[in-house]
Amino acid sequence: MPIEVFSPARLRRVLVIKLRHHGDVLLAAPVISALKRAAPQCEIDALVYADTAPMLAGHPALTKLHLIDRGWKRQGLRRQTAAEWRLIRALRARRYDLVVHLSVHTRGAWLVRLLRPRWSVAPRFRPGFWAKSFTHYYPAQSDPQRHTVETNLDSLRALGIEPTAADKQVILVPGAEAAARVANLLVGHGLAAGGFIHIHAASRWGFKCWPAERVAALCDALATKGWPLVLTSAPDANELALIAGICAARDRNAVASAPARCVPAGTVDLSGQLSLKELAALTAKAKLFVGVDSAPMHMAAAMGTPVVAIFGPSGDLEWGPWDPLHKGHRVVASNTHPCRPCGMAGCNDSKLSACLTTLPVAQVLAACEELLA
């Protein structure tokens, strides 16, 4: 049977699927914006993992968020099956005209076959079951020479929808509750909006992190220039350990001139204390964000805060801070390691990245000074 010609005017409901990590989900937001602009009459839903929901919750063009709990698998086969069936029934009840699948997760192909939308689009991936599941395809899930936002938007270009410049902004909505808590925290610590630097040195992937001693040296240099600092991380044990290492290194640096203390004066440690929405609200108030390739870095860029992003083995052309607002973000990476970006989990998958362990503090500080000026 021939494929029906796609028409945005005939869209009533659309499902966007992004079953990936937090940063990946956030960078899918422009697809929702572009769809709403091209078909303002349609309702747009999204399907994501439950822990990544804050990345899209509150998006003004989003009607409904459907969630998959990664914990279902740990609840036993009976409960998992019941949860999956409830999800499928909820999705079927929406009667989608279009499904936009933004990864190569096999679940997307199965869902398209179950939901039977008029149109469906996914990355070109493999022959057989996958290739016979969708009506339209775009070239690839990722491209090391193109930013992930543009690759996601290729899904709509495959349908004949060309995104506008306004569509390409990544929208992240902290919400009133998160904004209020952060405002109270800032007042409590004597910090003014635009009067502090937000440093998020941690990542769930340790091989993307800059060594604690170098982060500490950068913090000391910025503090010497009079900038209050706010340190954040996820509540994950490894991330908290990195923050503790940074504080300890700063103590060692200061021991000759000041009594030892875990958090030096002018530094606020909020590691493990903020929700994702609160993290967004905090970074929106910062003068500058400094961090590694991580979801908080993408969040800072989305909130319009100037970003200094420290990159190691991952590709900055594909995953760098997205800059449609022309904030002039800076990517800092080694210029003495022609092997990067290798895309590996550290050198030879060792979990240790030489391009990061040797990255000079002065190089990162120079980027900070450019944006602070």
Image (cartoon, grey):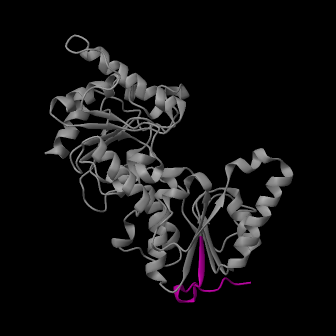
Location of residue 144 in the rendering, given as x and y in whole percent from the top left corner:
45, 49
Question: x, y (%) of residue 71?
Answer: 70, 47
Residue at 66% over, 56% down? 105
Residue positioned most to the right: 78
Question: In this orientation, does residue 172 appear?
Answer: no
User: Looking at the rendering, which quadrant does residue 150 occupy?
Assistant: bottom left
Q: Is residue 233 above or below residue 117?
A: above
Split into 4 quadrants, where in the image is the N terminus?
Answer: bottom right
Q: Is residue 169 visible?
A: yes
Is residue 135 highlighted in magenta? no
Residue 246 position in % (x across, y down): 37, 25
- Along the viewing direction, whichever of 125 and 289 lies nearer the viewer: 289
In the image, residue 266 lies at what x, y percent? Answer: 24, 32
Instruction: Give the vertical position of 181 relative to 97 (above or below).
Output: above
Q: Is residue 48 above or below residue 245?
A: below
Quadrant location, the C terminus: top left
Residue at 24 percent of width and 56 percent of height: 327
Magenta residues, start to end: 1-15
The quarter holding residue 113 reads bottom right
Q: In this image, 149 relative to 108: left or right? A: left
Q: Is residue 51 or residue 205 the one in the foreground?
A: 51
- Whether residue 2 is in magenta: the answer is yes
- Identity of the residue drawn at 75% across and 62% down: 128
**How many numbered badges does the structure rendering display?**
0
Q: Which residue occupies the foreground of this view, 263 or 81?
A: 263
Q: Give left or right: position of 18 versus 355.
A: right
